[in-house]
Amino acid sequence: MTGSASAPLRVGLVGYGLAGSVFHAPLIAATDGLALDTVVTSSDERREQVRGEYPGVRFAATPEELWSRAGELDLVVIASPNKTHVPLATAALEAGLPVVVDKPVAGTAAEARALAALAEERGLLLSVFQNRRWDNDFLTLRTLVADGELGEVQRFESRFERWRPQLKGGWRESGAPEEIGGLLYDLGSHVVDQALVLFGPAVRVYAESDVRRPGAEADDDTFIAITHANGVRSHLYVSATAAQLGPRLRVLGSAAGYVKYGLDPQEAALRDGERPSPGVPWGEEPPSLWGRIGSGESPLTGGGTPVKTLPGDYPAYYAAVAAALREGTPPPVTAHEAADALDVLEAARRSAREGVTVELGA
């Protein structure tokens, strides 16, 4: 790391599509101690977009140009298409740069663990951007579980559903294996990571995965069932074809259940141009969207008691990255944790393809 103790850490951002423009650039720029220094894009249109919001930012046409400036940077963020994550993260580490990689960090757990080994060998930070650990509903549920409000959790249901009957196009919907597209790896990376954070290692995985929309090539409607080592069962749904959306979270315990509808508001706010700022409320939602905790009667007919949703906190991710670089604290998400989630995703893909239940760690 070349930045002084007082100067902001200089960040190079590779890619300025959805991930780079909506998530990474705004959150980097909003983080005390970080400065967006260089954006890698060859698109004139995207360069103009960057200049409009981040005056003074430099550009590189290729990642190789960025590596040649490694001595002028303190961190590289990989926000390019999935198939480039492993080669670009490898090149950045070999150039001596700490790295944040958007999820999924790789197509396989073995690739993720190889990246982790390289980072450890070089003594460099490697973290994976699993921003939905800082969703408002997940932070609220994590607190309820830790405080024992539900009793012993028995079943965790998590849905990331959308109604998008028409294809949007692009690599995320490609069926080419090298693209690492489809919802299993896109939204599945989030719901699986959340399940493992809450309830620990998976020992058994079953999945159903379908390609439902005309002309689609990659899975757009997938279900994953996980049995955790502690006995909790996670039922996870990711879909672009859900004509009626289910609850985002439904968690059943021995004493009570928690049901929460609606998505965390932070992505929508970032897409609309809102930015986190000190002293300004961020990630909050109105009481009408709070989840409910209780037993017996359905929350849809008034059962249970409203639970105030904690504010979402995506800025916490890059604040933790900055602290890890300056103070040596643990990174907010490790590549080993991402590899554990990829073990589940690979097992789910096999289960859906072969119609079998897959045992992990056997």
Image (cartoon, rainbow, N blue to C red):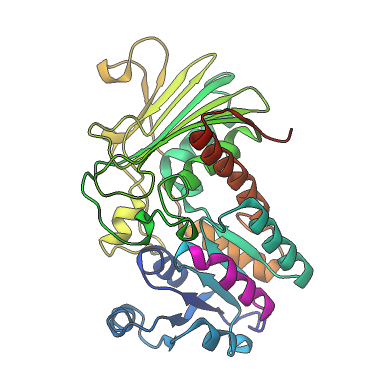
Q: Is residue 88 left or right of residue 239?
A: right
Q: Is residue 207 left or right of residue 199?
A: left
Residue at coordinates 45% horizontally, 69% vertically from top-left? 80
User: From this viewpoint, which residue is outermost toward the right?
Assistant: 121
Q: Is residue 354 above or below residue 166?
A: above
Quadrant the N terminus occupies:
bottom right
Could one spot residue 7 in this view of the protein? yes
Residue range highlighted in magenta? 83-98
Could one spot residue 281 in this view of the protein? no
Residue at coordinates 60% horizontally, 51% vertically from top-left? 338
Residue 58 horizontal/vertical position (percent): 43, 88
Choose top left, top right, bottom left or bottom right for residue 121.
bottom right
Of residue 323 and residue 264, the one placed in the foreground of this image is 264
Q: Is residue 10 above or below residue 316?
A: below
Numbered-mark total: 0
Residue 97 horizontal/vertical position (percent): 64, 77
Quadrant the C terminus occupies:
top right
User: From this viewpoint, which residue is outermost toward the front?
Assistant: 354
Of residue 211 and residue 92, the one placed in the foreground of this image is 211
Choose top left, top right, bottom left or bottom right for residue 69.
bottom right
Residue 36 horizontal/vertical position (percent): 47, 78
Q: Is residue 320 left or right of residue 275?
A: right
Give yes or no for residue 91 being in the magenta stretch: yes
Residue 141 horizontal/vertical position (percent): 49, 33
Q: What is the chief secondary structure element of the magenta stretch?
A: helix
